[in-house]
Amino acid sequence: MMYTMNHYCTREKDGTVHVQNAVMGIMGQHHVHTPNDFAKWRKDVDNNAIEWLDCDPCDCGLKAGEVRAGK
């Protein structure tokens, strides 16, 4: 059986893009990109797997280039 990883993205006021990965509803890595790094990262990801969220600002405390492993 094959599972699809979804990437839930938010663009913050400072321009960074926060990405939360999930497979079958199970949260994985949370990573933060600069706009340029996000553009490079996005080239390797299926556009159908990216979902842009309109939500409150992320309060994860991570900065661009940092990653938090899933729980």
Image (cartoon, grey):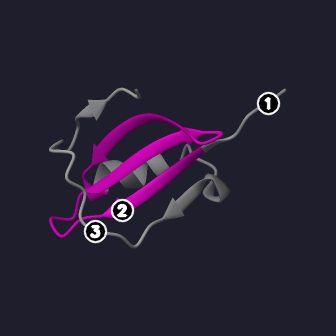
Tell me if 14 is positioned left or right of 36 in this view: left
Disc 2 residue type (three-letter): Thr
Taking the view exactly as shown, the residue that stands out farthest to the right is 1
Main secondary structure along the magenta-highlighted residues:
strand
Q: Judge the density around disc 3: few (<14), some (14-19), many (≥20) Cα neighbours within 10 Å.
A: few
Q: Judge the density around disc 1: few (<14), some (14-19), many (≥20) Cα neighbours within 10 Å.
A: few
Q: Is residue 60 above or below residue 15?
A: above
Disc 3 designates what residue? 56
Q: Residue at x 36, y 39 (%)?
A: 30
Q: Residue at x 23, y 64 (%)?
A: 57
Task: Please name whichever residue, 64 or 26, is drawn nearer the observer in this view of the structure.
Answer: 26
The location of residue 61, given as percent across then percent down, is 15, 44
Quadrant of res 9: bottom left
SS class, disc 3 = loop
Task: Please name whichever residue, 11 or 22, is drawn nearer the observer in this view of the structure.
Answer: 22
CA separation in Å, label 3 and label 2: 9 Å
- Which dot, 3 or 2, sits closer to the camera? 3
* Count of numbered circles in the view: 3
Disc 2 designates what residue? 10
Disc 1 designates what residue? 2
CA separation in Å, label 1 and label 3: 32 Å
Q: Earlier in the sequence, mark 2 or mark 1?
A: 1
The residues colored magenta run 6-35
Q: Residue 14 in magenta? A: yes
Q: Are marks 1 and 3 in contact (CB under 8 Å)?
A: no
Q: Residue 58 in magenta? A: no
SS class, disc 1 = loop
Disc 1 residue type (three-letter): Met
The location of residue 10, given as percent across then percent down, is 36, 62
SS class, disc 2 = strand
Quadrant of the image containing the C terminus: top left
Tell me if 1 is positioned left or right of 32 in this view: right
